[in-house]
Image (cartoon, rainbow, N blue to C red):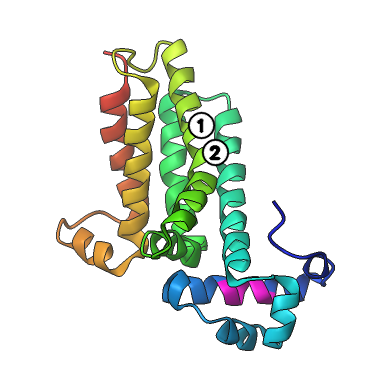
Amino acid sequence: MEWATKRFRQLDSAKTQRIIAAAVSEFAEKGYEAANTNRIANAADISVGSLFQYFKTKEDLFRYVIHLGAGIIETDIGKILEKEISGRDKIKELMLLTIHACQNYPEYQQLYHEITATGNRDLIRDIARELETYASKGLIELIRQGQERGEIRTDLPAEVLAYTLDSTMVMMQYSLTVAYFKDRARLYQLEEPHDFADQMTEIIWSSLKQQ
């Protein structure tokens, strides 16, 4: 579905990026319910009337920026799945991808966290499907590839193993971007991000590999 209007799609790149950046920042900082379209318009240096010519509702704007984040996930995970490398190496690349995303798209990570705080349950379900569907399919496929090659254990369903991997990646995201979880991580004196990724790869692979 097209969340943005044709008028928005016809804007020059600099203006679209300004609007997107303002929206992502506002939604990440305030959450969906408290986000204010006037502040978004002001930050993007446009009128609020113009903003609603580009997106009919605040929800459409929210869904649009979420869709952009999902596109980043799709592209990056897809590249890893296509590589002719071992299952273990793919998992390591996923851990490094998690760190890369947190370092390069911190507001998108915060936005992901804020989704769970919004009061609109139907909106959450729809967005969760959009965000998670491709990632879940990709991770399940990664596990099945490893099972078919004899690298990954087959005594548990691929879906359960993929969910365990995904949950680890989500917790890594929170530990690197959300204040509460960053403070929580410090209690465990965790290593620097890239060393932490190596350690998590070893932990996950030891639980996934065929014995």
The answer to whether residue 130 is left or right of residue 195 is right
Q: Which residue is mark 1?
A: 137
Q: Vertical placement of 122 versus 117: above or below? A: above
User: Badges 1 and 2: C-beta atoms under 8 Å apart?
Assistant: yes
Q: Give, as a three-letter code, the residue at label 1.
A: Lys
Q: Residue at x 63, y 61 (%)?
A: 64
Q: Helix, strand, or loop for circle 2?
A: helix
Residue 16 lies in quadrant: bottom right
Q: Vertical placement of 190 versus 22: above or below? A: above
Residue 47 lies in quadrant: bottom right
Viewer-proximal residue, 52 or 19?
52
The magenta segment is 18-23
Where is residue 205 shown, x and y percent of the image?
32, 28
Q: Residue at x 59, y 86 (%)?
A: 38
The answer to whether residue 143 is magenta is no
The answer to whether residue 19 is magenta is yes
Residue 160 lies in quadrant: top left
Q: Between marks 1 and 2, how big is the CA–CA gap? A: 5 Å
